[in-house]
Amino acid sequence: MSAAPLDQPFMARALELARKGLYSTHPNPRVGCVIVRDGQIVGEGWHARAGEPHAEVHALRQAGDKARGATAYVTLEPCSHHGRTPPCADALVNAGVARVVAAMQDPNPQVSGKGLLRLMHAGIAVHSGVLEAEARELNAGFIKRMEQGLPFVRIKLAMSLDGRTAMASGESQWITGPEARSAVQRLRARASVILTGADTVLTDQARLIVRPDELGLNAELTALAIDRPPLRVLVDGRLRVPLSAPFYQTGPALVATCAAASARDRFLEDGHELLAVPGSNGHVDLRKLLMELAGRGANEVLVEAGPRLAGAFARAGLVDEYQLFVAPKFLGSSARPLLDWPLARMAEAQELEIRELRAVGNDWRIIAVPKRP
Ligand code: AOF
Ligand code: ZN
């Protein structure tokens, strides 16, 4: 079945709906659906939270009888499996939809193509691949987890125009302005996991929480964002951070360590979880940690860490995206680099591709992705 002239604008609307789930669908993908009959939208839906109805179900409910003979636009192949909810492919068949347009196949091995096949076998015209690049970008984390068993890793960094990340004294709050900090709050809220290291928690008294009043979102999305906050993960290979640190006092956290397990009970008593990860010289094996987090359903991990931990992620080739906030000020001399990454020759430099450069308040944000050799 081929594309029709209005497929793109209707899919664009379905993607707009899917984006409403940016802060809340974890571990599920963000999905939107539009039902169109005689050129008119008769139903719209989006997936809000795991365990709740999928996008198609909301849209079909709104469309009611008008779904018969209609076209359904879905940003992800309708599911064919019984998960927390019944298969959407069956719901579309039962509603008498005549045509289904999907942006992309579902990378979930439980579905991957089977949803579209089920629709075809029921005599429904099926087309996939409309605005696929946009749909893939929206769920890059879910796709990477399904395909590679690893989450999408985004590192947030902030520096002054003279490339400093702190004063010589270590003081670093705040380099960027309120708009940039609000953007960082949204990066936190969309992540499944916010990950940091012992250095940051010890020197900055970091808590890594989502603050609803700083999100800059409407009431509906704010409520969804704070209802299922990201898991806070502390990488503390040698268990240097005391339980009295503000990080541990702000709610349950997961601490990943390669230290002896004898400390376990004291974390459990405080409501935290201690995860033993293999490592060497007091350094946790970050790839193994990420695999463990993906196993727990983490799609996107936001790393907010100092130069050593951020550098370790970079060196290991585990970073998918850097978001660098640059403040228009000079902080003067200080030794702290952005990333601890000893490279001797220009030929060894990590090449990046800049995807976006835009003003955020008085600061600038650069989104860059590593060029893979
Ligand atoms: C869809 N529409 O809106 C979403 C889909 O446990 P469940 O029942 O919520 O199923 C989760 C899986 O369903 C998820 O891993 C992905 O494959 C698919 N998500 N599918 O047809 C939706 N959110
Ligand atoms: Zn479904």
Image (cartoon, helix red, strand yellow):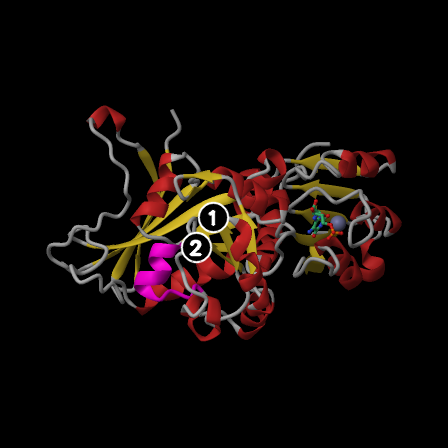
Is residue 354 positioned above or below 26 on the image? Answer: above
Q: Position of residue 177 (x, y in %)?
A: 28, 67
Contact check, label 1 and label 2, Cβ < 8 Å: yes
Q: Is residue 12 visible?
A: yes
Classify mark 2: helix, strand or loop. Answer: loop
Say which residue label 2 marks: 239
Q: Position of residue 311 (x, y in %)?
A: 33, 42
Is residue 137 positioned above or below 30 on the image? Answer: above
Query: Disc 2, ligand 1: is the CB inside 8 Å?
Result: no
Which residue reaches farthest left? 333
Amino acid type, label 2: Leu
Q: Classify mark 1: residues with Cα within 10 Å, few (<14), some (14-19) or many (20+).
A: many
Q: Position of residue 226 (x, y in %)?
A: 55, 69
Q: Is residue 134 visible?
A: no
Name which of mark 1 and mark 2 comes first in the sequence: 2
Is residue 354 positioned above or below 20 on the image? Answer: above
What span is in magenta? Answer: 197-208
**In-front residue for pair 331/31:** 331
Amino acid type, label 1: Ala
The image quarter in which residue 16 lies: bottom right
